[in-house]
Image (tube, coloured by chain):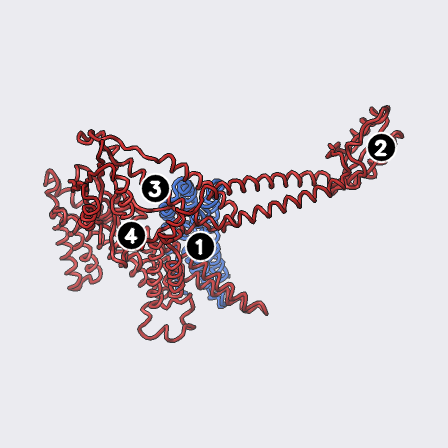
Amino acid sequence: MDTALGLTLGITGGALAIGLAGFGSAIGIGLAARASAGVLSEDPEKFGSLLILVALPGTQGFYGFLVGFLILMKLGLVTGKIPALTPFQGAEVFFSALPVALTGLVSGIHQGRVSAAGAGLVAKQPGSFMKAVILSALVETYAVLGLLGSILYLNGIKF
Amino acid sequence: MAVIPLEKIGILGLREEKEEFLQWIQREEEIHLLDLREERDKKEYLKYFQLSSSRRGEIEENLHIIDRALEDISSFKEKGMFAGIIPEKIVIDEEEGKRVVETFAWREVCEEIFKLRKEREEIVRRKEALERRKEKILPFLTLEIPFSDLKPTFSTRFLFLKWKKKDDVIIKEGISALPLTYLELVGKEGNFLYYLLIYHFSEEEKLQELLKNLPVEEFSPPGGDRIPQEELNDLEKQLKEEEEEERKIMEKIEKLLQKERSLKIIYDYFTFLLNKEYAHEETLESKSTFLLIGWVKKEEWKKLEELIKTKFPSFYLTSLPLEEGEEPPVSLKNPIFFKPFEAITRLYSLPRYGEVDPSPFLAPFFAAFFGLCLTDAGYGIIMVILSLFLLKKLSVGKEIIGVLLLGGLSAIFWGTITGGWFAIPMEYLPSFLKKEGLIKFVPLENLMFFFTLALSLGIAHILVGIGIEFFDKLRKGKILEGIGENFSWLVMIPGLILYFMGRGSPKGFLGLKLMSCGFLLSFASVFRHKNPLLGFLIIPGGILWKFKDFVGNVLSYSRLMALGLATGVIGMVVNTIAGITKQIPFLGFPLMGLILVCGHLFNLAINGLGAFVHTARLQFVEFFPYFFEGGGKPFTPLALEGKYTIWKRR
């Protein structure tokens, strides 16, 4: 019973990392893509640069997936060699997934907003494309730190 | 290796030679003209001169015509999704340019393009009208008389009705209850049946009453004075003729597309002329002289002066002093290895005149960080090959490609010493890639080492930034300020690191000593404050504040590790998924190949973008604030610079 609870907690953590960070990215990309579609209706040739701006808030989903995958490996779900986890160990895995899950969720949405504003910037001043990208990437820093935190915590858990 | 020093020059020449002179300096591409129109109101001595006139109007008109023609041409062409993302220019021989200018009848070609576009638009419009008519009569092909022949008689009226097939029986029964009616099926389309209902006028009221309760709709007939089938045949014939006509026009357009190159050349030729006319406007004139003031690179000035003197012996040339508050434009010059990184500097902003050019300093760090964010030699090799290919193919935007090339080389380096080859697990790597001593650390196993490496690179990066500021202050003679605000940190930070590395040991003690030295050195700038005593109180607070910034900045470099790991792990996921698909019978191997190729390319694209963006951010947000302000205006000499072409000179 105890080991089942531990495993369940661990899997929940991985699922939250993938789910919440992906959730943030989906909203972020949605916001940026909507703004870009508006710009494209005026100037279809900007597709290439707008695509990059729209893709930027997508990284959070990957960071979440990455941690989810690491948890999957750690719990032995890929190889089938599932270790016997105490509920505490499961909870440790669960909490170590939270940094990337939460920072991914929030920063994904906000990065999408900045990218959307960036699409407006690119529409008016095509030369400012890289500046729009850098502004958008400033938000991503915190998702990167969340990813780093999750990886470091996960690495520290031994069972 | 820096911002190039410029000379402000004044040239007084004969008006009759002005055109020839401007033409000549446009070819030389050395002089950045100062707009004297604005200066004239400010300076007394310029008031002796008049504003210059130009022939801009006519040239702009020509450019407008060619621009429209080029727009039409591009509307004929099919464009890919990513067209325009990589800017491209046509490189031509100057001879070819001249030949085109002399022989190419651009006006006729433009007229022809406009005519063809108009004709094609008309054909398309006519075709649409025919198609619409065709659609209208298609349901009524069974009707054997023209619609125009259907006219009410003295005692009969008629209605066009349509209803759904499924209601056919009920409606027919309903209507046939009225004896003086006749129904004829005239057409079918989809689910609908079209009927002509003829009735005696005495039935009108009853019929209206009946129809109200039935699911029928009245429709307006397509009309026409011919039998629908005949009309259709005719429409089809006309459509074919129009298509034939369109094909002929498209053939002509196809031929004209070949003229696009010449049109672009002529467009740029007029741009050259236009820029020369702008230059005319930026100079001032008297009755028989003209005055030009501009900027020239100091190193080129002597040579240019000699050239002007021999070519235009009557001209008076002079160097002018900088006026108060005047900022010359900025041009950068760096050795080939650093040159690509000027693009990164420009992305942020050009340095101001007299400021340090950060390009050579950020170059090694940019390359190192970029590579570390990928940490995969396989990806590095792909990037190097791709950049070499693009460098060969592209004529503009080479600087950024150069950055990617060096970044790729750096990724190969980091990949080699970490055993990163397409994220293949260490045990499967060929033995020469994991030779003793080759692999220094494995990212996923030595996380703390990777973390420390990232932060150490960050500390080095920031120390270089502080160092640049220090030397810049020395250069400007602000020695005490430099020692107090910059050099003190160059002592304090290494001291702090030594202290933490060797707490309790002599090394730690040395660190402590260095820290104290640095702290004391900070007070060197105390005399900058109006009241030195107050300075003594402020400085420790300032140190704490700066230290907080420093710690924050250093931690920001941890992204190097996170991005490096992300590339490796996503690569691993791709490999794992590909490994699983291998077990699918028959399709397994091709599917595995497809997943490997697409997956890794995708990973490279998304993480390459991330690596570039985050590395650039580390320069702009963490590195630059220590010494760089930016805000310079670019040095843009009057030159033969076109929108579409590059004219190569012998």
CB contact under 8 Å: marks 2 and 4 = no
**Looking at the picture, do discs 2 and 4 lie on one chain?**
yes
Residue B459 % position (x, y): 25, 56
**Badge number at residue A64:** 1
Q: Which residue is mark 4?
A: B342
Depth check: A56 or B102 in front? B102
Image point (21%, 44%), residue name: B312
* Amino acid type, label 4: Glu
* Amino acid type, label 3: Leu
Q: Chain of mark 4?
A: B
CA distance separating discs 2 and 4: 86 Å
At mark 1, the secondary structure is: helix
> Among the chains, which one is blue?
A
- Disc 2 residue crowd, few under 14, some 14–19, many 20+, Cα 10 Å: some
**Badge number at residue B175:** 2
Residue B25 % position (x, y): 26, 45
> Among the chains, which one is red?
B
Q: Disc 2 or disc 4, which is closer to the eye?
A: 4
Residue A108 in the figure: left or right of residue B441? right
Q: Which residue is mark 3?
A: B273
At mark 4, the secondary structure is: helix
* Amino acid type, label 2: Ile
Q: Chain of mark 3?
A: B
Depth check: B390 or A18 in front? B390
